[in-house]
Image (cartoon, rainbow, N blue to C red):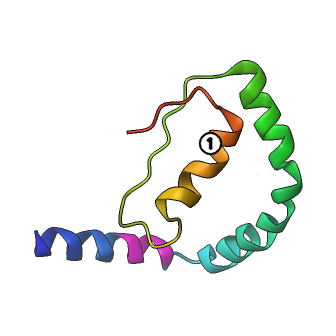
Amino acid sequence: MRYFRIALLVHDQALLDRPGNAEIQMDLFYDYRTNPPLYPHVQAYFRKHRPPTLIVWGKNDKISSRPTALTPTSATCPTSSFT
């Protein structure tokens, strides 16, 4: 398993190291600031259309705890089920 993980890291780093990629990543990171004002519109879309959606979250996620991960979905889709 360890070899597999190292191979994935090497592959990912090779993709990150492509010429021009650092600038692309910084542009995406900077542009993210425009997303939060759109959240109410996205949530309204999900409430209205209820498209089938698979949301993946892991119990060891270091960014979002389980309550944090589920809160926006619970508010947006109160009939959702979580496992």
Residue in front for this viewpoint, 46 or 79? 79
Residue 9 x/y as whole percent: 31, 75
- Give the answer, above or below, for where 58 lies relative to 8: above
Residue that extends furthest to the top in the rendered view of this protein: 49
The segment highlighted magenta reads: 12-16
Say whether residue 34 is left or right of residue 3. Answer: right
The residue wearing badge 1 is 73
Tell me the residue at 82%/32% (across/down).
Answer: 44
Residue 3 is drawn in which quadrant? bottom left
Percent from the top left, x then y, of residue 60?
36, 67
Expressed as whole percent of the image width and height from the top left, the position of residue 28 reads 72, 67
The residue that appears at 40% across and 77% down in the rendered structure is: 13
Between 47 and 1, the one nearer to me in the picture: 47
Identify the image quadrant of the N terminus. Answer: bottom left
Left of 50 or right of it: where is 14? left
Tell whether 77 sits left or right of 10: right
Query: What's the amino acid at mark 1?
Result: Thr
Of residues 54 and 77, which is closer to you in this image? 77
Q: Position of residue 45 (x, y in %)?
A: 78, 29
Dividing the picture into quadrants, the one containing residue 12 is bottom left
Q: Main secondary structure of the magenta part?
A: helix
Q: Please, is residue 32 above or below residue 45 in the view?
A: below
Q: Is residue 14 a member of the stretch shown in magenta?
A: yes
Q: Residue at x 40, y 75 (%)?
A: 14
Is 65 one of the magenta-colored residues?
no
Q: Secondary structure at mark 1?
A: helix
